[in-house]
Amino acid sequence: MTGAYEVKDNKMARYLVLVQDMMTCFEFIMFELVPRSENEQADALANLTFTLPRLACSISLKSLDRPSIDATPIF
């Protein structure tokens, strides 16, 4: 990451700090921006419980009590 990434949401800012900290664990790391137009399937899956709640009973989903950024790191 070049430092040109702007974070508008506090929760996302915490993820950015976490990623920046984790970057020091790697000799080489590369990030690639995926345009929304090429990420529709992942976007739909992430929003599945909001967009298609009737399917939740046939698809295994894990509901988090709090954002994963609040979880204890496992590394």
Image: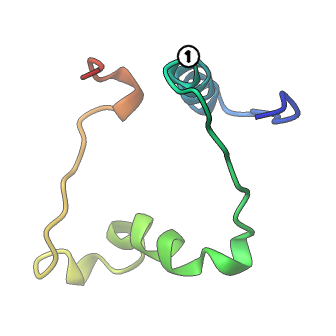
Q: Which residue is disc 1 drawn over? A: 21
Q: Position of residue 49 (x, y in %)?
A: 32, 68
Q: Is residue 72 left or right of residue 42?
A: left
| Circle 1: residue type | Asp
- Residue at 60%, 33% in the rendered image: 12
- Residue at 62%, 28% in the rendered image: 16
Q: Position of residue 58 (x, y in %)?
A: 11, 82
The one nearer the camera, 1 or 28, is: 28
Q: Position of residue 36 (x, y in %)?
A: 70, 71
- Image quarter hosting the C terminus: top left
41 above or below 68? below
40 above or below 15? below
Q: How many marks?
A: 1
42 above or below 32? below
The one nearer the camera, 60 or 34, is: 34
- Image quarter hosting the N terminus: top right
Answer few, some or many: residues within 10 Å of disc 1's Cα (few below 14, many 20 plus, some between 14 and 19): few
Q: Quadrant of residue 40?
A: bottom right
Q: Is residue 17 left or right of residue 62?
A: right
62 above or below 18? below
